[in-house]
Image (tube, rainbow, N blue to C red):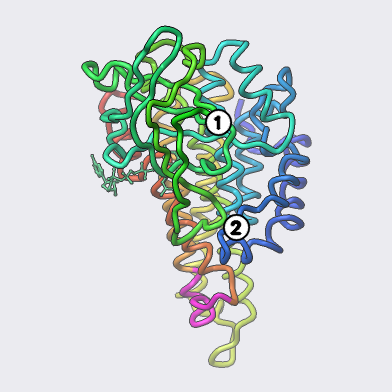
């Protein structure tokens, strides 16, 4: 049966997350955007609210949230600040390979520690020469006795500078290409692992991305998730599940920009009337509202499919592409509606525009999402 209304419990989750964003994110969003510092105070509060450990199952001490609940929260967090949202959301990204392929002991160990205190983990798939073509990675894990010896370089690892461990993808059999890929949990204190400098970015500057250098880094074989050769499947399944949270981020950033533009259009007087009275402006706002609503519905659908154990490669790629393209379009139009003020740092819309751009790039660019959608529809899905 179709039901488009949120339950009382879901509405409470949304309201609480909005209050969190108003109280802990908006007041410091500009500061962390400018400094790029690690927002310890915000992440401590996010832990107290259960957001850092949202996807850790209750049996391991976490909040045990569903993907729909995660999407509801993520929209509000991204409304608060795109960069801070990414730091919090990416903890869910990092823990998903463990949720998908970890043994009960691995879940207890790696997820349990994230539920004990404000702690981070990171998802490390990308390499300097293997971005969209992630299956061509060259980072190598060689099995020697009861250890894997890792060598290679990973990049763009979100939260990597502050993570306790990395869900790291590497090749255990270079002759097999993507089918020779495995996912190994690499603890931060692993000898031979060096964390590089933080990336200086256009937007989402409160979030942290680093390169990781692995020089004969030794990891126990028991840190392998699933079986050797399952890494690429784990990565793709992970991204199918987590793209709804990125789509939700798109909805949140778009909504933040839209609300400011709407208020401005109703109060800014030119030629003796509010600029909203011009159809050129009101139609822009109508299009914004239309795309935001559609994005949210697609986001909930993709998340709901994960919660119900349904394969959602197509729907999560559609939701991610539509919602994050919407964030980019809406925030760009919001800057236009505010005119000169839109371009100044006195208003948040320019930040929304910078933050939105990244949503179209990470967790698979929107070109790659279109490849996923095309492959799915070619197969009749
Ligand atoms: C701030 C930030 C955070 C990130 N966080 C993480 C993280 O936590 N973990 C992680 O593993 N990675 C992370 N990434 C990496 C991100 O997922 C990659 O940047 C992305 O997948 C694209 O890879 P690339 O940058 O190498 O671009 P490329 O793959 O080199 O692509 C360049 C351009 O070509 C296009 N393109 C490539 N192939 C095709 C094709 N076949 N058809 C059409 N167009 C194509 C792309 O869409 C893009 O526009 C992050 C990146 C950034 C910038």
Q: Is residue 357 above or below residue 108?
A: below
Q: Residue at x 29, y 37 (%)?
A: 130
| Horizontal side of residue 46 vs 259, given as left or right | right
Q: Residue at x 55, y 81 (%)?
A: 275
CA–CA distance in space, label 1 to label 2 = 22 Å
Residue 28 occupies quadrant: bottom right
Give the labeled residue for mark 1.
189
Q: Main secondary structure of the magenta part?
A: helix
Q: Residue at x 38, y 40 (%)?
A: 364
Find out whether residue 120 is within the magenta segment: no
The image position of residue 298, as x and y in percent, is: 50, 40
Residue bounds of the magenta highlight: 334-345
Q: Is residue 45 above or below residue 272?
A: above
Give the labeled residue for mark 2.
37
Mark 1 secondary-structure assignment: loop
Extreme residue in the left direction:
175
Q: Quadrant of the N terminus?
A: top right
Determine contact: label 1, label 2, CB under 8 Å: no
Mark 2 secondary-structure assignment: loop
Please rate how many residues cluster around mark 1, counting C-alpha atoms within 10 Å: few if below 14, some from 14 to 19, many from 20.
few
């Amino acid at each position: 049966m179709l039901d488009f209304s949120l339950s009382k419990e879901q509405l409470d989750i949304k309201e609480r997350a909005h209050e969190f964003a108003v109280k802990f994110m908006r007041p410091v969003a500009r500061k962390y955007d400018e400094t790029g510092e690690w927002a310890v105070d915000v992440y401590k509060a996010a832990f107290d609210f259960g957001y850092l450990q949202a996807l850790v199952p209750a049996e391991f001490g976490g909040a045990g949230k569903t993907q729909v609940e995660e999407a509801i929260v993520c929209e509000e967090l991204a409304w608060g600040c795109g960069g801070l949202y990414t730091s919090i959301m990416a903890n869910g990204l990092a823990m998903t390979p463990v949720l998908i392929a970890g043994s009960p002991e691995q879940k207890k160990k790696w997820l349990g520690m994230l539920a004990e205190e404000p702690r981070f983990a990171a998802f490390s798939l990308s390499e300097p020469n293997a971005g969209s073509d992630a299956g061509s990675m060259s980072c190598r894990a060689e099995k020697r006795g009861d250890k894997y010896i890792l060598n290679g370089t990973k990049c763009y690892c979100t939260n990597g500078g502050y993570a306790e461990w990395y869900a790291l993808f590497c090749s255990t059999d270079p002759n097999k290409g993507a089918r020779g890929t495995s996912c190994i949990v690499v603890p931060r204190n692993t000898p031979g692992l060096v964390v590089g400098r933080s990336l200086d970015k256009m937007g989402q500057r409160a979030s942290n991305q680093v390169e990781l250098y692995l020089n004969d880094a030794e990891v126990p074989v028991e840190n392998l998730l699933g079986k050797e050769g399952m890494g690429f499947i784990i990565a793709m399944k992970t991204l199918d599940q987590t793209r709804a949270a990125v789509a939700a981020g798109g909805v949140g950033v778009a909504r933040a920009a839209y609300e400011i533009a709407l208020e401005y259009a109703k109060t800014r007087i030119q030629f003796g009337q509010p600029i909203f009275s011009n159809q050129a402006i009101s139609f822009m706002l109508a299009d914004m509202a239309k795309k935001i609503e559609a994005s949210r519905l697609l986001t909930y659908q993709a998340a709901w499919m994960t919660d119900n154990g349904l394969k959602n490669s197509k729907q999560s790629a559609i939701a991610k592409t539509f919602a994050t393209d919407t964030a980019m379009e809406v925030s760009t139009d919001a800057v236009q509606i505010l005119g000169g003020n839109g371009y100044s740092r006195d208003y948040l819309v320019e930040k929304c525009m910078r933050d939105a751009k990244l949503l179209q790039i990470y967790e698979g660019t929107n070109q790659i999402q279109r490849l996923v959608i095309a492959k799915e529809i070619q197969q009749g899905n």
